[in-house]
Image (spheres, helix red, strand yellow):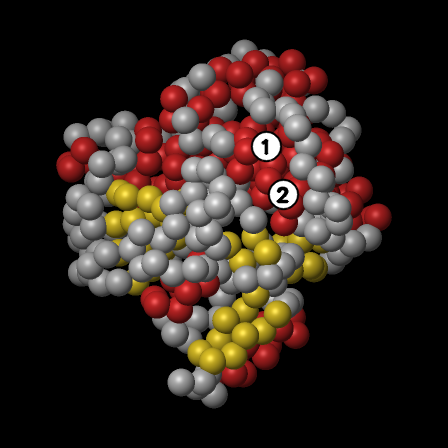
Amino acid sequence: MRNIGIIGGGLIGSSWAAIFSKSGFNVFVYDPYPEVFNGYEERVDSVFRNVISDNDQVYKPETNRYHLYVSYACPWAHRTLIFRHLKKLENHISVDYVHPDMLENGWSFLKNFPKTTGDSLHNKKYIHEIYQISDKKVSSKATVPILWDKKTHTIVNNESTEIIRIMNSAFNDITKNYCDYYPSNLRIEIDKINKVIYENINNGVYKSGFSRTQEAYEDAVTKLFSSLEMIDEILEDKEYLVGNVLTEADIRLIPTLLRFDSVYYVHFKCNLKKITEFKNISTYVKRMFNNPAINRTTNFDHIKRHYYFSHENINPYRIIPIGPNSPI
């Protein structure tokens, strides 16, 4: 078996990965930092994009068939944990929590940190090994969350936005939980605000933090806070973003807001304003954090440890702040 590892997932690294993969090599790409385009970070498209449905030929909704691999620290994974709780899927979809440190080998299954589980299915050491089990020729980044199928021994999906929509409806007849967080009558409005949230807020904090030019940093931070001001205006006379009911849009936004003051404000230099200084957003975060699905899936020890310890290029001495330990 011919295996090759490539450090660096940018244009050159990705090109070499494609060449080696086509030549029959088993390729794993590791990049300690996301890709940089136009001076700032861009997320990479997910590779596994299957759905779970009664109409699907392979992936049917079944209890205890599927498994989540997540990090408490990762905001993209956090939204799947929130949905798992909201949709009463805890007894139907099992979960493993990785170690908060993401170092030279990526996410690991070390268990020397509280609230980590190891890999209960395969006893592997690293998340990238889970990708290799699913597809030995995979050349994508080894990210979380991962929705794994225990029956076919493969990754169903590794795109958080699609995983939460799977959870929203696929298992309704099993759980008898028919709460719909992506209702058809609100989808146009949800999709519209999701686009702003993703580009300027969810991803905006990363663009700010990993900028490699002053121009890119200022552009990202300006768009970030302009969008936060827009959100603050929306919440002036509403409890939620769309239709004044809890929807997918709120669940995609809240993980970033929860991490903002403790991490992004300092670590990513998103310091024009704290969340606590937004009149309406601060009230919104406090109310949302009282929701058990959000409160019980938030772990500030993992969050702070991950960002301040893993990003040695930003925090070379790896000093982890004592506080804060709550969003508000």
Q: Label 1, secondary structure: give it.
A: helix
Residue closer to the observer: 53 or 155: 155
Residue closer to the observer: 298 or 286: 298
View extreme (right): residue: 214
Which residue, given by chain and number where applicable, does mark 1 sit on? 259
Q: Position of residue 242 (x, y in %)?
A: 46, 25
Which residue, given by chain and number where applicable, does mark 2 sit on? 307
Q: Quote the CA–CA distance across marks 1 and 2.
A: 10 Å
Q: Amino acid at mark 2?
A: Tyr
Q: Position of residue 230 (x, y in %)?
A: 64, 26
Q: How many discs mark residues in the rendered view?
A: 2
Is the residue under label 2 in contact with that under label 1 (CB below 8 Å)? yes
> Between tags 1 and 2, which lies in front?
2
Image point (70%, 24%), residue name: 274
Q: Is residue 223 visible?
A: no
- Mark 1 vs mark 2: which is more N-terminal? 1
